[in-house]
Structure formats: C-alpha cells, structure tokens
Amino acid sequence: MKIYTTTKPLILGSASPRRKDLLGSAGIEFKIQPACGEEPKPLPGQNPEEYAKKTALLKALEVSEAHPGNYVLGADTIVVRDMDILGKPADQDEAFGMLKSLCGRSHKVITGCALIGPDGNSVNFSVSTDVEFIDFEEKCIRAYVTTGEPDDKAGAYAIQGLGAFLVKGICGSYTNVVGLPLARVIETLVQWGVVVPGDE
C-alpha cells in the first residue's frame, strides 16, 4: 500500500537524485524536469532565507512556463555560516576552505521551496536546520575532499554520504539537510490536493 497517492500531474524541477529519492520514498509519483537557468548570485547582505526562496521560485517558474497544466515543485538548498551563504565549491581548495571554516561550530542549512499550480498560483517557503560539526583534523578534511563527494554539494559536504562523520548533531529536519524538507513539502502537496493519503 502506498503512503501517498498522486492525484494531479506533478513535476520536480530538479535533477538532484537526493530530492528524487526523498519525494519518491513516500510513494509520490512525479516527472523530473530540471530547471536550466543559472542560479542568481546572492546580493551583499541578502537574507539567506529570502535568497533560497527566491531561487526556488525562479526554478519552479522556469519549468512551469515550459510545462503548463502541471504542478511544479522547485527547491534550492544553501549552507549558511553566520550570514555568509556557502554555495557549491568551485574546486577542491575552495571545498577545503569551506569545511575548515565550519570545523567545530554550528551553521544553518536552509532549503527554499516553491510550488506552482497550473493556474499560476504559488506557495513559497523555507525550512532551516541547525547543524553542528565536530572539531576535526585538517588531514581528515583533505582526505574527504579527495573523495570527490563535496564537489557538487552546497557547503561542500553530504550528510547522507561520507560527510556524515563531520556532523556532531542537528536540530531540525534531517531531510532538509539532505536537500528537501519532506514533511513540509508533503504537507503542502496535501493541502493543495496534489497528493492524498494512501491508495485511492
């Protein structure tokens, strides 16, 4: 028996295998159509939550305009140290620098989400999780960086992968750190009638 059944056409506007797996884990059916537009760079002093929400909305809008008649879910996950937004590292040196700066302290992982309906109506929200790293040795960072896992990850780590060894604890949604705040997303999909509990 399915946990949720999809009743309306849904598109996930992301190529992330992590988001695909999370959304599919609840039995939700959807198509994948990644947004291709370049993500805007954060403005100096821009509120991180507003930036994540705006980027998610831009992704959803792009896919929605190309695929009318569907509900489109867009998402963007960022890592925030103090008020500095850490994106995906450009190279291994930048990945090392990001991880070193997070050593022995807490940071936030924020995912902005946007759901757009066929009628153009939308909902836009963000979910924040506090993550604390252990105080690890530099040689551990270098070894982790050489695995290649940090290359395409915001903040240069994956909590669901090898990067789990970095994490001392979290406060908030675990799936949000992976890339999609699943409970909040499903709650929204149910409210919009896109999915219903169990089999129809």
Image: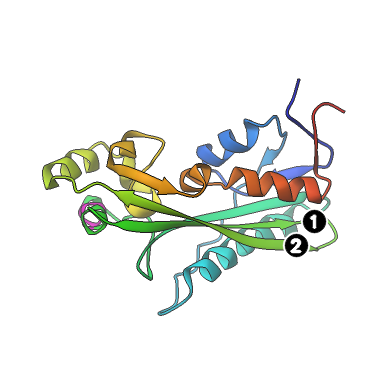
- Residue for point 56% across, 46% down: 180
- Number of labels in the image equals 2
Identify the element where label 1 is drawn.
loop
For residue 18, above or below residue 77: above
Identify the element where label 2 is drawn.
strand
Q: Are marks 1 and 2 in contact (CB under 8 Å)?
A: yes
Find residue 144 and report its horizontal and vertical position in percent. Answer: 23, 39
> What amino acid is at disc 1?
Gly
Residue 72 in sight from this viewpoint: yes
Rendered image: mark on residue 117: 1
- Which is more N-terminal, label 2 or label 1? 1
Segment colored magenta: 93-97
Find residue 197 and report its horizontal and vertical position in percent. Answer: 79, 34
Q: Look at the image and say whether residue 96 sits in the magenta stretch.
A: yes
Rendered image: mark on residue 153: none
In the picture of the structure, the residue carrying the numbered disc 2 is 122
Find residue 68 and report its horizontal and vertical position in percent. Answer: 80, 54
Q: CA distance from mark 1 to mark 2?
A: 6 Å
Q: Look at the image and say whether residue 110 sits in the magenta stretch.
A: no
Quarter of image, res 81? bottom left
Between 191 and 87, the residue placed more toward the observer is 191
- Residue for point 36% across, 58% down: 107
Q: In the figure, is residue 51 to the left or right of 33?
A: left
Residue 12 in sight from this viewpoint: no
Q: In the figure, is residue 84 to the left or right of 10?
A: left
